Amino acid sequence: MSPDRQRSNFEIFERVTPRLNGSVLLVEGKGVTKSDDGARTTTHESLAILSFDVDANRYGWRTYDLRGTVRGPDFVVEPDSFRWSFHDEESDVLLRFNIVIEDDTWHETGEVSPDDGENWYQILEMNLVRH
């Protein structure tokens, strides 16, 4: 969704690669839009690392984006899903994302809260299929 709350479409490519004998997942994401004249513009590019900390007995999720922002958001793992959330200092909002994985489909939603979690508004929905 655009800043003026209008729906916008874009292509997202996600590559999820197991590393270190499957103990770490590397997630690379890139989003592009295409203008009327066919020009493609990168609107989103990120890298995330999912790992399990044996000593702390918990998962860790570390993200990096085009702006140079590094985050270690709150991360929760459920049997068929996981979610993470963080406070975005630049826009002073809370963001949360939920991913449900079923067979070869990754369904992700993103929400924003401008009032410390009292109200949530969906800003992202994407369905990815494994190839």
Image: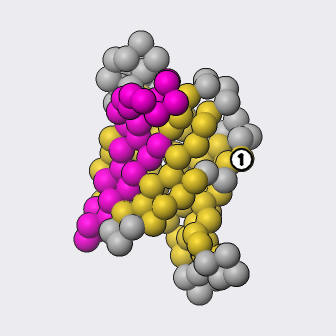
**What's the magenta region?**
96-124
* Residue shown at the point (41%, 36%) measured from the top left: 111
Q: Which quarter of the picture shows residue 90? A: top right
In the rendered image, residue 101 lying in the magenta stretch gets the answer yes
Q: Nearer the viewer, residue 28 or 113?
A: 113
Q: Is residue 41 visible?
A: no
Q: Amino acid at mark 1?
A: Val
Q: Left or right: 83 with respect to 54? A: left
- Name the residue that disc number 1 marks: 70
Q: Nearer the viewer, residue 21 or 78?
A: 78
Secondary structure at numbered mark 1: strand
- The furthest residue to the front: 118
Q: Nearer the viewer, residue 69 or 46?
A: 69
Q: Left or right: 22 with respect to 79? A: right
> Which quadrant is home to the C terminus?
bottom left
* Residue shown at the point (33%, 68%) measured from the top left: 80
